[in-house]
Image (spheres, rainbow, N blue to C red):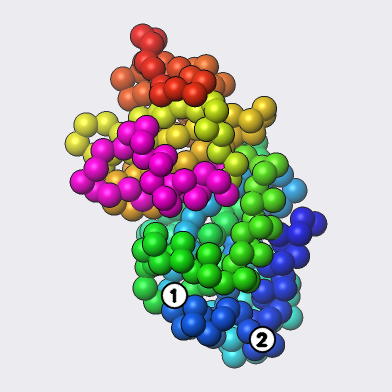
Amino acid sequence: MHAYFDYCEELFNRFLTGGEMLPPEIGAAFQLESCPEPYLLSGEAADPLCFLTTDPGPARNIHDRNRVIGCRETPLAGHCGYMENAARLTAHYVDEAGSSLSQRLIKQIKTAGKLGASGMLELHCLPFRSDWPPTEAEAGAAIDGAPQLATYHEHLRGYLAARSVVALAAVPADKPIADGTLEQPWVARLGGLIGFSRERWVRVPLSADGAPQAALFLSAEGSLLKGICCLQGAADWPEGAGMARLVANLERPPGRLTDPSGRVVRMMVNSQAGLDDA
């Protein structure tokens, strides 16, 4: 088992025993009485397709420490390790038909299956819950200011180095997605975490006219895929045809990526992408 998963088990055990999760000045912004959620898992963790998001969102009753320890009507069980609980949580969330979380996880599970992965693994940049959606600046400040999060990110980066992974990033709704989007601080942080190569990459448009703008930044490291999916206004997947286009491009070799018009997008070295007629 990779050191990342070992550290997640340590975080879970620290939660169960009431140990210090974060320095008080940073921990005050998080719901540390609720179970941390560093990742969610569907299928097997042997060779999963990984997805990276910002945080697990606000706490619910099922995440309360006393309920987890007592295992009272909750998918979380204190007598189980975190990896087993991650699988139980994922199944619970998927069963919440119609919720945005359920829809996101189902899309990811289906994508992992189409790409032949052993499972779907959603990892969180912030493993702790909060009752507010952290801004990119707040998330970055927490990561940079807490030794526990620095250690978590060290293990997370080490694990993702040898994995295919797609990160989700929100971009301002009033700004177009362009090559320079990769320079935005949070997008750049995600790229560093997943091992996105700035030497060889491409921007693949995903959205049709009239939809929120979406694009997939993709780099290839041998057989590994390193992607960042940017969507205007939300760190989520595009809808309908945009999602189908994203999955289709993940299945294709780098030389046959296509934009919404069907034109082939060329992967360039140290340069922005160009378009060829298909």
Outermost residue, front side: 145
Q: Nearer the viewer, residue 155 or 132?
A: 155
Label 1 SS: loop
Residue 238 point in image, percent of width and height: 36, 43
At a point 67% along the width and 29% down the height, the residue shown is: 223
Instruction: Please name the amino acid that badge 1 sits on.
Output: Ser
In percent of the image, x 54 and y 26: which residue is there? 200
**Membership of 199 in magenta stretch:** no
Residue 57, compared with residue 53, is above or below; it is: below
Asked if residue 86 shows in the view, the reply is: yes
- Depth check: give the residue in front, 175 or 168: 175
Residue 109, given in percent of the width and then of the height, sits at 55, 48
| The C terminus sits in image quarter | top left
Residue 130 numbered mark, or none:
1
Was residue 168 drawn as part of the magenta stretch in this picture? Answer: yes
- The structure residue drawn at horizontal position 44% and vertical position 79%, both measured from the top left corner, is 29
The secondary element bearing badge 2 is classed as: loop
Q: In which quarter of the image is the N terminus?
A: bottom right
Q: Magenta stretch: give its range.
A: 165-193
Q: Name the residue under label 2.
A: 19
> For residue 150, which quarter of the picture?
bottom right
The x and y percentages for residue 136 are: 39, 59
